[in-house]
Every structure is written in C-alpha cells, then in structure tokens.
Image (cartoon, grey):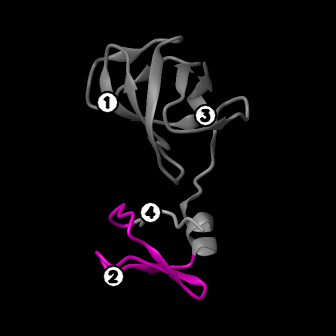
Amino acid sequence: MSCPPCPNCQSEFVYQDQSLFICPECAHEWNPSEVEAEDTVTVKDANGTLLAEGDKVTLIKDLKVKGSSIVLKIGTKAVIKRLKEGKDHQLDCKVDGAGDMMVTAQFVKKA
C-alpha cells in the first residue's frame, strides 16, 4: 500500500499507524479522510462552472483597479494561480497586461 506525501513538508517517508498517517521528518499526524474535506475550496464562475488552479479565465465586465486609474476591459484573459475562500476576491490571478491581482469569481468565465 502506498502512502500519500506529507501535506506539511511533502516528505515521501510517511507511514500508517492504525487510521492515521505519520511523517517522521516533521512529526505531522493526520487522518486522510479529514484532510480531503478541509482542503477542498469550490469556486464557481459567472456561468456556474467550477474553477481550479491553472484554469484560464476571461473577464465578462470592465473592472476598475482599486488605487489606480487602470481599467481592465471585457475579454481580458487571466490565469488562476490560487483559489481562496470568501466573499471578496476568490481568485489570485495573473492578468494579461496588469500583472498579479485578486479578482472576484462572479466577474469571470472559464475560457
């Protein structure tokens, strides 16, 4: 039986003790069924499609950038680097022509 890598330090030297997995390098112990439930962040775009890290998205509305005179136009493309739980700005994206910024999921669609 193969054990998953440690979620803390990514070590491959993990062993199982009854229902827990234990990492000998960082002494982290975890139950695999609890980890999967905690790590799932579900974010949907304007059309209701589930988004994941690495997805390419397109803006569906002109967006003003806070603290700047820049306006992101409809159709601007971005790549999702990280998903975040919350009401505001669920997507950490690299936006074409503007760099890295947080974007609200309701203003994008999956490309």
Instruction: Give, as a three-letter code, the residue at label 2.
Output: Ala
**Badge 1 or badge 4: first in the primary sequence:** 4
What whole-number distance in Å separates the C-alpha atoms at marks 1 and 2?
35 Å
Segment colored magenta: 8-31
Q: In the visual, does 100 lie left or right of 35?
A: left
**Badge 2 or badge 3: first in the primary sequence:** 2
User: Which residue carries the number 4 mark?
Assistant: 5
Element under label 3? Answer: helix
Viewer-nearest of discs 1 and 2: 2
User: Which residue carries the number 1 mark?
Assistant: 100
What whole-number distance in Å separates the C-alpha atoms at marks 4 and 3?
34 Å
Q: Nearer the viewer, residue 37 or 25?
A: 25
Q: Nearer the viewer, residue 63 or 108?
A: 108
The part of the image, by quadrant, that contains residue 64 is: top left
Q: In the visual, does 74 lie left or right of 82?
A: right
Decide: is 58 above or below 11: above
Examine the structure image and report whether residue 53 is included in the region drawn in magenta. Answer: no
